[in-house]
Image (cartoon, rainbow, N blue to C red):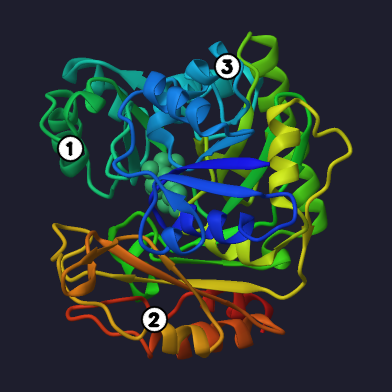
Amino acid sequence: MRVLLIGSGGREHAMAWRLAGRASVKKLYATPGNPGIAQVAECISPSPAGPEDLARLAEWLGADVTVVGPEAPLVAGAVDAFRARGLAIVGPTAAAARLEGSKVFAKEFMARARIPTARFVTVENAEDGVVGLDRFPLPVVLKADGLAAGKGVVVAGERREAEQVLRAMLAGEYVGAAGRRVVIEECLFGEEVSFIVLSDGLNVAALEPTQDHKAVYDGDQGPNTGGMGAYCDSRIVTGSERRLILETIIQPVIEHMAREGHPFQGFLYAGLMMTSEGPKVLEFNVRMGDPEAQPLMLRLEGDFAEVLCAAAHGDLAGARLAWQDAPSVCVVMASEGYPGTPRTGVPVAGIEAAEAAGAAVFHAGTKLSQDGLVTSGGRVLGVTASGADLAAAIQRAYAAVEQIRFEGAHYRRDIGVKGLKRWG
Ligand code: AMP
Ligand code: GLY
């Protein structure tokens, strides 16, 4: 079959790497892709801007199935445009993508479906906001309603700070129009887990659990990023936790979305806090996580394209995803300045040596210039490896990281260490 992949990050490179070279995949296209993806797929760059043009591209390429990596095309209605033309695509419609596109929608949906999540109120003006703040102990969590590229959530430790951030969000000074409505919610405590499933609208196939590392510095210090690394190890949740997550969170989402007329098809990412009262939802994403997709794709076995096709055609019943036992780890190498404004255009060297050290090196923010490969964004590479156990996977990933050089590169040295501490 011919497969089209939409996106340009480390997640999409990992997906392309998994899809390429399988018997069922006769041709792999990506738009816009990146220099890493270009090694395994034909890239169409720049990417068509709107949903209609993406659908026309898929039609022109004769794609049998399209899979969408990032949230923006989903929220903008790419899936709706494909379906209108009878094209197979993996991802939720714009209406279903509101689970990520609007925090207010997601919280009200969870209340309707009785899905465990933090207590919350929604406010649209400073007056109600101040009253709202009084209903929660500190620290308190403030969330801009709309998409804000990972910058829309603030955990405020002090009342004054909370009020300042709240006023700025509502005034559009924090994340623009995304902050016109704000969710104020209770702060939850525990281990964070990324639990992702693939759904065809009715049935689900669960991916292995992963854990992200959002803060920029070791020990979860410093500002939040899009994710500085992730690891995938079956032990991140126990068997009974896994059943609880499926029964109290995943199944109710799928059932209620269908009942409300917006069946959820595609990758559903539940960002969970494993609290003393059980798993509770921090957020939904309507796509695979990045970097989570990188260690996930390394462990995934079998024919990914077949599974994607089944999901696109409502045919996932009975499908199970198969996984290698070996845990996997992805260390993100980022540009100087990230998560602020990154320095770009810096030459990158050592990728082949890193691969020779046993890692898959996924490109996230690179481009080819006259000087060869240079940095082009905040997160540059996802250096991903597996090992007989978590310690071996960590060791292999960092041995590969040491082979890579670009000026100003920084990365966390403790990806996966939480797991080592938990399981010895
Ligand atoms: P989000 O942008 O929704 O993924 O949230 C970013 C991060 O904020 C999450 O990964 C958590 O670390 C944190 N967070 C969000 N909501 C809460 C909450 N209710 N309690 C504690 N931390 C939270
Ligand atoms: N790693 C978190 C996310 O993809 O949103």
> Closest to the observer: 223 or 389?
389
Residue at numbered disc 3: 83
Q: Quadrant of the C terminus?
A: bottom right
Kindly identify the amino acid type of the residue bearing the numbered disc 2.
Answer: Ile
Say above or below: 330 vs 28.
below
Does residue 274 appear in the picture of this structure?
Answer: no
Q: Which mark is residue 129?
A: none
Position of residue 382 measured from the top left corner of the image (x, y, whole percent)? 43, 68
- Residue type pointed to by label 3: Arg
Residue drawn at (17%, 81%), measured in percent from left and top?
A: 407
Q: Amino acid at mark 1?
A: Val
Whether pointer 3 and pointer 2 mark residues with C-beta atoms closer than 8 Å, the reply is no
Q: Which residue is mark 2?
A: 351
User: Residue at point 78% right, 57% down?
Assistant: 302
- Marks 1/3: CA–CA distance: 40 Å
Q: Nearer the viewer, residue 384 or 244?
A: 384
Residue 100 spot, x, y in % from top left: 45, 31
Q: Earlier in the sequence, mark 3 or mark 2?
A: 3
Q: Secondary structure at mark 2?
A: helix
Query: For numbered disc 3, what is the local secondary structure?
Result: helix
User: Which image quadrant for residue 144?
Assistant: top left
Q: Quadrant of residue 21?
A: bottom right
How would you rate the neighbour count of disc 1 (Cα within 10 Å): few for under 14, some for 14-19, many for 20 or more? some
Q: Identify residue for label 1.
A: 165
Earlier along the polypeptide chain: callout 1 or callout 3? 3
Real-space Cα separation, disc 3 to disc 2, in angstroms: 40 Å
User: Which quarter of the rendered picture does the N terminus lie within?
Assistant: top right
Horizontal relation, residue 198 to residue 184: left or right: right
Q: Nearer the viewer, mark 1 or mark 3?
A: 3
Name the residue at 39% across, 81% down.
351
Residue 383: horizontal and vertical position, in percent?
Answer: 45, 74
